Amino acid sequence: MKDSERVGKNGKTFAGACLLLAMLGIAHLGCSTDHYRKSADKEAYQIIKQSSPKVPNMETQFSIETNQIVALNDLPVVEKIDEVLGPTGTNEISCRILPLSRALKIAVKNSRTYQTRKETLYIEALSLSLVRHRYTPIFSGGGSAYWKRSAEDGVDGLVENQSVETSGNVGMDMLMSTGAKLATDFTVDFQRFFLGGPGTVTSSSLSATLTQPLLRGRGYKVTMENLTQGERDLLYALRDFVRFRKDFTVQIVSAYYSVLRERDQVRNAWLGLEATRKSAKKSRALFNEGRTRMADLSRYEQDTLNNESTWIGAIRSYKQSLDSFKLTLGLPIDTKLVLDDRELANLKIEHPAITTDDAIRVALVSRLDFYTTRDQFEDAARKIDLAANGLLPDLDMVLQANVPSKPGSGIPELDFKKTSVSGGLALDLPLDRKAERNTYRGSIITYERARRALEQAVDDIKLQILNSWRQLDEAKRQYETSVLSVNLAENRVREQTLLDELGRANSEEVLSAQRDLTSQRNNLTTQLISHVVSRLSLWRDMGVLTIKEDGSWEESTDAKRK
């Protein structure tokens, strides 16, 4: 075979090998993405699991997977049309009846808001995994391959030279707790000549560099600050998530009862409409007999139309609130379900026997967000010292070592007898520290802000407890007043109905009594729900509302109820 043919064949072979290697690299990249995802999940979940015991009431089985199946087939169905909904009541036949406990369970699995908050916590754990990684040995490696063809003058004329040059290197970098940085690198070069060259030439070298700061950047606290802050940031994220879980449960409970309140208002509007229809029918009969005035009949009929309009609007409002609640749970809006009326019927007033002073004291030792504010104040104090360290000169001790390879064309072998070692000091005077100066001054301001934020947090908690308690106490008193008001309104309606039957009633009085009864019934339900939600809000603001894995809650048992 001629030299030129051999050169061409070797070049094509090498080009084909390079193409094959590139294709294998791309294929490996595609196949490894699933591995990287699983690896990230495993590490992030492990970090969260390790840190969760530090935060009370954190989920034990945390996951951001969204392939949750919402099954409603085991729930009872609506079999009877509720006449208070009029013609739209037929749409509820075969709808699933959703109790509050199942609504909470669905919400924690399917709510988009809940999922976003879980992902926020997960991303914080991923960030910490990278920070931790930077304090471990970090390995790197690479290589290159080149085919080279050239021609040069020789004794017998033009001589072609073809070669393959390859190189590879493996390195390791590590940041130590003292601030020292260790960098190592092992490099191998290989050159193969096909024509006109000496054959095969190889070389290698091993080098290591250790850099230890003696002033700026020196010490455990300075070096480990990123890891320290990363660990604390994850702790803060865990507390925020637990606090969110408490808020979320209260929001779902409030939304659930709000839908039931809307339905109850439909019922009350329908009862009011039926009462006015009955009165209007009786008035029409009396008018036909000449026993009542046209003005009274018109008043009854007009009020009937008004009540019918109110009833229709109440149905629309109820349907809208039910659809909105489905979206809150993360369910499709066309999901066929209704809420369980028995949940509203089973509600009762359970008023906690605890003073506001005791509630504030409990909150200041239980609120996770207050713990975070206090810890952030400590962070700000710590960073002043770190910023002061940045104003120092750079004085580094540098140690270097290099080991070359023995000469030859075979497998490269390191020649430790020729090891070279050097060491010295590197000084960088602080002639330009404006950025560091600004950072230091800013850290002092941040500290003062954190101090004020801590003071503000104490006052905010006190105010929240006072407001929550006042709202709870107001709801209790309003409920008690509403009970009396409903009784009075019912007595008034009975009285006006009796007078109407005797032909002695005033139409305006009859209609006014019925309107008041409807209004007081609505208000009674509103105040009952308000008290329940306010009670949960008080436990939440005190930091003692415990949320279970399924989203349901346990209230404080320390305070007796009356």
Image (spheres, helix red, strand yellow):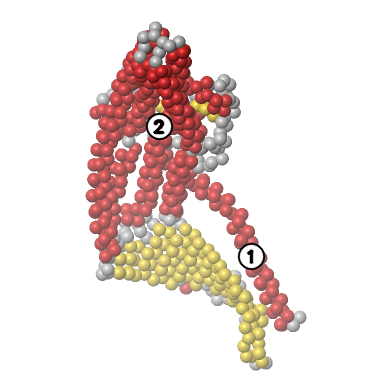
Res. 307 image quadrant: top left
- Which one is in front, 271 or 436? 271
Q: Are marks 1 and 2 in contact (CB under 8 Å)?
A: no
- From the image, tell me which residue sits under label 2: 250
Residue at 59% across, 58% down:
29
**Label 1, label 2: how many angstroms apart (C-alpha)?**
58 Å
- From the image, tell me which residue sits under label 1: 21
Helix, strand or loop at label 2? It is helix
Amino acid type of disc 1? Leu
The picture places residue 82, in percent across and down from the top left corner, at 53, 21
The picture places residue 230, in percent across and down from the top left corner, at 38, 49
Residue at 37% across, 64% down:
211
Badge 1 local density, few (<14 within 10 Å), some, or many (20+)? few
Q: Nearer the viewer, mark 1 or mark 2?
A: 2
The answer to whether residue 335 is visible is yes
Q: Is residue 121 above or below residue 521?
A: below
- Numbered circle sitting on residue 297: none
Amino acid type of disc 2? Val
